[in-house]
Amino acid sequence: MDEVSLYLDLVERVLREDPQQREGQAHMNALQRQWPDLAKQIAGTDLDPFSLDHRLPVYLAWVERQLGSSGSPADR
């Protein structure tokens, strides 16, 4: 299973654990759990969906690029 699929599975798990979360919150919480360095890179930026769910399409494109790229996180 690729990292993007693992990420999406984790988002679903996070939502099941706390169904009161908005989708954007669940996405950021999942990223923080498994890829904290990536969460730090995006937190507080215009791509961060934690407070604004409408940012999810751009955020998800960013996550796919980060998790789908080869090399170390520093190379991304």
Image (tube, grey):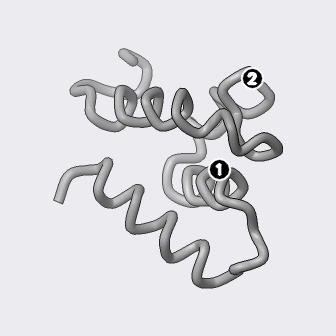
Q: Are marks 1 and 2 in contact (CB under 8 Å)?
A: no
Residue found at x 36% / y 15%: 75
Residue found at x 36% / y 35%: 64
Q: Which mark is residue 51?
A: none
What is the three-letter code of the residue carrying label 1? Met
User: Which of the 4 image quadrants contains residue 37?
Assistant: top right
Can you say which quadrant of the picture contains the C terminus? Answer: top left
Name the residue that disc number 1 marks.
28
User: Which of the 4 image quadrants contains residue 22?
Assistant: bottom right
Residue nearest the observer in this picture, 60 or 7:
60
- Decide: few, some or many residues near mark 1? Use Cα within 10 Å; few <14, some 14-19, many ≥20: many
For this view, does 67 lie left or right of residue 52? Answer: left
Can you say which quadrant of the picture contains the N terminus? Answer: bottom left
Given the current orientation, which residue lies at the most extreme bottom position? 17
Name the residue that disc number 2 marks.
45
User: What distance separates the C-alpha of mark 1 from that of mark 2?
Assistant: 12 Å
